[in-house]
Image: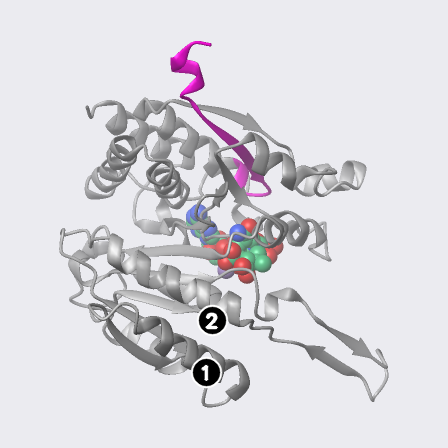
Amino acid sequence: MDPQISARKRIAVIPGDGIGREVVPQALKAIQASGAKVEFSEFDWGADRYLRDGVTVPRDGFAMLARDFDAIFAGAFGDPRVKTNIHAKEILLGMRFQMDLYANVRPVRLLDAALCPLKGVEPKDVDFVVIRENTEGVYTDAGGVFKQGTADEVAIQEDINTRKGVERIIRFAFEYCERHKKLDGSPRQRVLMCDKSNAMTHAGGLWQRVFKEVAAEFPQIATQHMYVDALCMQMVHDPRPFDVIVTNNMFGDIITDLAAGLQGGLGMAASGNIHPGKTSMFEPVHGSAPPIAGKNVANPFGAILTAAMMLGHLGLTHEAEKIDAAVLEAVRQNKTTQDVGGTLGTREAGESVATFVAGRH
Ligand code: NAD
Ligand code: IPM
Ligand code: MN
């Protein structure tokens, strides 16, 4: 076999619904422009497919992804025509849970001061990462409804926290802290565990104990704890002290939308769903944004930065850096969509990034 071809990374692409279908092509364009040796295979999983033939994930779909691909690049899932949101649950949460992608890594970086709603905050002040547990918590959907529709109705939604699950995500956060640098090249130094152990004592107690145990293995890394409510206040008051934050599934979901606000909005935020050594999945933090879908106004930069994250994960560091730098350049030159102050459409903003990428060597 041609070694060039065999060296290509195989990427499964699942654009999904709404603006997912608009931003994903822009991310693929940036990857192509970077010269990364990849090949894409696109899958039509999403609302249209589900409404057509009732299939959310084809039989053995997750096993196929794990076996045949080096990474998965996804857009967004959610469509007003599917009221139950069942397809999103089965595809998106399906990948996270069934492929055991336990670490949802969500970097929070401010590319330009103009994008941040906080006064006097510069890019160097917003450079942290949220490590969100991705396979447990309230997302397991354990529970039930009894006496539904009556005055005695009971709804139970369980929060499941296993020692194994808590321990591996906390260890992942410390290892991440050890291995990754800040954008200015300085080392990451601190892991902050965020919970609500003052109210949710059972789950919080486990997180507290495991955090202390795992922290002892990393004496060079400073530790800190915050309740999630106080952390939200701190994030909008002064985000500078944050470095690596580790938290459960639901708090991680919520604080990363808040953190997206610091970066210029959901259109700027990237994420990876990772299990070291297994096929991992990359997707922007935002959803399908039905009200703006199909209008060529969605910001493609979150998806493009996600593409860079995926290439970095696959070891294509040079290509990833080119894409990151190109997005930064586009932001600096205001070649952006309206949500971040520009005048361009989705395609045009994507095109400007691809041009900057192609111009870098
Ligand atoms: P959303 O992220 O789709 O939109 C929230 C707000 O941010 C909207 O005002 C939207 O217009 C704006 N926005 C989001 N992405 C943008 C972009 N790239 N450029 C410009 N503006 C952008 O969240 P929502 O409205 O709560 O959810 C819509 C649907 O998406 C729901 O079905 C939800 O379940 C789903 N969802 C999916 C994912 C995912 O697939 N990863 C994530 C979040 C929400
Ligand atoms: C996200 C989304 C999902 C989540 C939804 C669509 C289930 O909000 O990826 O942040 O809550 O994890
Ligand atoms: Mn979310």
Instruction: Report whether residue 263 is seen.
Output: no
Marked residue nearer the N-terminal end (2 or 1): 1
Q: Nearer the viewer, residue 306 or 114?
A: 306
> Is 329 situated left or right of 101 in this image?
left
Q: Nearer the viewer, residue 247 or 345?
A: 247
Q: Residue at x 30, y 74 (%)?
A: 216
> Is 193 situated left or right of 238 in this image?
right
Helix, strand or loop for disc 2: helix
> Is 86 situated left or right of 186 in this image?
right
Q: Which amino acid, by three-letter code, is at mark 1?
A: Lys
In the picture of the structure, the residue carrying the numbered disc 2 is: 251
In the picture of the structure, the residue carrying the numbered disc 1 is: 196
Above or below residue 241? Residue 38 is above
User: CB of residue at label 1: within 8 Å of ligand 2?
Assistant: no
Q: Position of residue 327 (x, y in %)?
A: 27, 39
Helix, strand or loop for disc 1: loop
Q: Position of residue 340 (x, y in %)?
A: 32, 50
Q: Residue at x 74, y 80 (%)?
A: 155
Q: Which amino acid, by three-letter code, is at mark 2?
A: Phe
Above or below residue 181? Residue 29 is above
Q: Dot 2, how many residues are within 10 Å of its Cα: few (below 14), some (14-19), or many (20+)?
A: some
